[in-house]
């Protein structure tokens, strides 16, 4: 999530280190600039595979961690909250595929609404 946009991928199940590296590579190719990634302390964010990839980028991708047990500092948590409480409120899918399609479409709509992205940063008090 940047100040103006959110870029995302949805995966089935828990996110693995290889998927994080895949996403970071796609992010770098899409944005074509240096990145500062702010992460929570999840084990896959600190894994050897991810660290090796970050080391291979030189200074092109830097990382920082929010303090432990502080989801209130992570603007992405507020984006997920918006998705669950507003965009998908009272939505009852008939299948996992329908849920994935609808969630993806609602997140895409959030990409077009700068006020939602700004609100996530403001709630995290990082703006």
Image: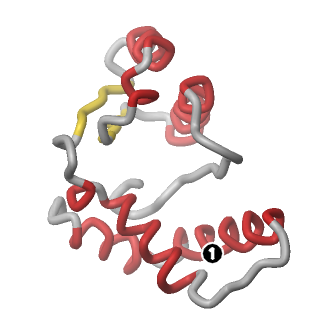
Q: In this image, 47 relative to 3: left or right?
A: right
Q: Position of residue 110 (x, y in %)?
A: 53, 74
Taking the spot 50% from the left edge, 41% from the top edge, the residue there is 31
Residue 87, placed above or below residue 10: below
Say which residue label 1 marks: 106
Q: How many marks?
A: 1
Taking the spot 42% from the left edge, 72% from the top edge, the residue there is 81
Q: Position of residue 76 (x, y in %)?
A: 39, 58
- Kindly indicate the quadrant of the structure image that contains residue 14: top right
Secondary structure under badge 1? helix
* Pick the front one: 98 or 56: 98
Residue 58, placed above or below residue 112: above
Taking the spot 50% from the left edge, 86% from the top edge, the residue there is 86
Quarter holding the N terminus is bottom left
- Kindly indicate the quadrant of the structure image that contains residue 46: top left
* Pick the front one: 105 or 57: 105
Residue 31, placed above or below residue 111: above
Taking the spot 37% from the left edge, 31% from the top edge, the residue there is 34
* Label 1: few (<14), some (14–19) or many (≥20) C-alpha neighbours in 10 Å: some
């Amino acid at each position: 999530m940047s100040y103006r946009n959110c870029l995302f991928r949805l995966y089935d199940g828990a996110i693995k280190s290889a998927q994080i590296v895949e996403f970071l590579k796609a992010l770098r190719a899409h944005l074509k600039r240096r990145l500062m990634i702010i992460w929570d302390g999840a084990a896959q964010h600190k894994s050897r595979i991810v660290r090796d990839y970050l080391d291979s980028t030189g200074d092109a991708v830097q990382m920082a961690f929010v303090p432990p047990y502080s989801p209130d500092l992570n603007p992405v948590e507020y984006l997920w909250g918006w998705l669950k409480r507003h965009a998908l409120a009272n939505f009852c899918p008939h299948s996992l595929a329908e849920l994935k399609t609808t969630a993806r479409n609602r997140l895409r709509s959030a990409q077009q609404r700068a006020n939602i992205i700004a609100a996530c940063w403001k709630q995290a008090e990082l703006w």
